[in-house]
Amino acid sequence: MYVLLVYDIREKRVGKMLKLCRRYLNWIQNSVFEGEISEVKLKELLLKAEAFLDLKEDSVLIFKSRSQQWLEKQVLGQERSKLSDFL
């Protein structure tokens, strides 16, 4: 499945979340990641994130699609990390 993950968490936990998400998805911009991931790997990522997140203060949004072709992305300005740069 194709996933777009966005998080808004306290500054003291941002570094941990950034490192965790980079292991599973492609970094797009600040707190935004996207990419192909299995349901099992997504559950693993979320389980690891829950270990340090404060669910009373932090939020993680996940948008799922069956494939990238069903997700229309429009960029205004410079895209920080282009997926087309990856092999």
Image (tube, rainbow, N blue to C red):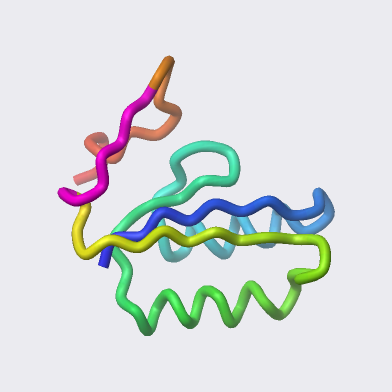
Horizontal and vertical percent for residue 54? 80, 70
Q: Is residue 7 magenta?
A: no
Horizontal and vertical percent for residue 9? 74, 54
| In the image: residue 80, left or right of residue 50 | left
Q: Residue furthest left?
A: 69
Establish if 84 lies above or below 37: above
Establish if 29 lies above or below 70: above
The residue that appears at 46% across and 46% down in the rendered structure is 27
The residue that appears at 49% across and 81% down in the rendered structure is 44
Secondary structure mostly seen in the magenta stretch: loop
| Rendered-image quadrant of the N terminus | bottom left
Establish if 76 lies above or below 23: above
Q: Is residue 71 magenta?
A: yes
Horizontal and vertical percent for residue 51? 71, 80
Which quadrant would residue 65 be assigned to in this image? bottom left
Establish if 29 lies above or below 53: above
Which quadrant would residue 60 be assigned to in this image? bottom right
The segment highlighted magenta reads: 69-75
Horizontal and vertical percent for residue 23? 47, 63
Q: Residue furthest top?
A: 77
The residue that appears at 47% across and 81% down in the rendered structure is 43
